[in-house]
Amino acid sequence: MKTLISRLFALMLVAVIGLTGCSAGTSGLLSGDYRQDTLMLVDSLRTAIDLPDDDPAKAEAQATAKVIISDFASRYRRDSSVASLSSFTTMRTALNAIAGHYSSYPNRPLPEKLKTRVEQELRQVEAALKREA
């Protein structure tokens, strides 16, 4: 009887840890609807990129964008239903370009050439979402 109770307790502990581990790391900003989440990420990126460097709201916009990027990547990276969509691959290209700049030049603002490229990719993401709907 004692082994049965300890096994049942261990099983419940694994289930609780597994379920809380699945939700850990999400901020609650994403809805789970890929299309809405992608559009929210596009808006957040545009806000963070377009604000002037001397704007006091820029730091908060960048922090919000980082949280949404992290949640978006962790939620959809392994989702096979969206991995082959052109909107997803284009979004990942834009995110990789931004991440590459910030990892190489963390204290420098995005150059205009990169801003233009990312904006073009964000427009492509929006167009792809319309086609995929």
Image (spheres, grey):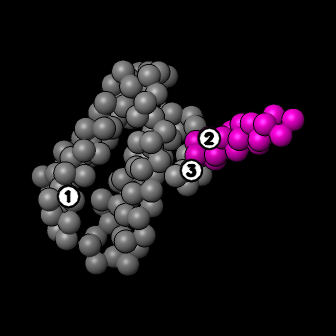
Residue 11 falls inside the magenta stretch: yes
The quadrant in which residue 59 appears is bottom left
Residue 45 picture location, percent across and down: 36, 53
**Badge 1 or badge 2: first in the primary sequence:** 2
Residue 71 picture location, percent across and down: 47, 47
Query: In this figure, which residue is indicated by the disc labeled 1?
Result: 103
The quadrant in which residue 67 appears is bottom left
The residue located at (50%, 33%) in the rendering is 35
The residue located at (12%, 52%) in the rendering is 113
**Residue 51 visible, this angle:** yes
Crowding around mark 2 (Cα neighbors within 10 Å: few <14, some 14 to 19, many 20+) is few
Crowding around mark 3 (Cα neighbors within 10 Å: few <14, some 14 to 19, many 20+) is few
Compute the Cα span from label 2 to label 3. 10 Å
Residues shaded magenta: 1-23
Residue 34 falls inside the magenta stretch: no
Name the secondary structure under disc 3.
loop
Marks 1 and 3: CB-CB under 8 Å? no
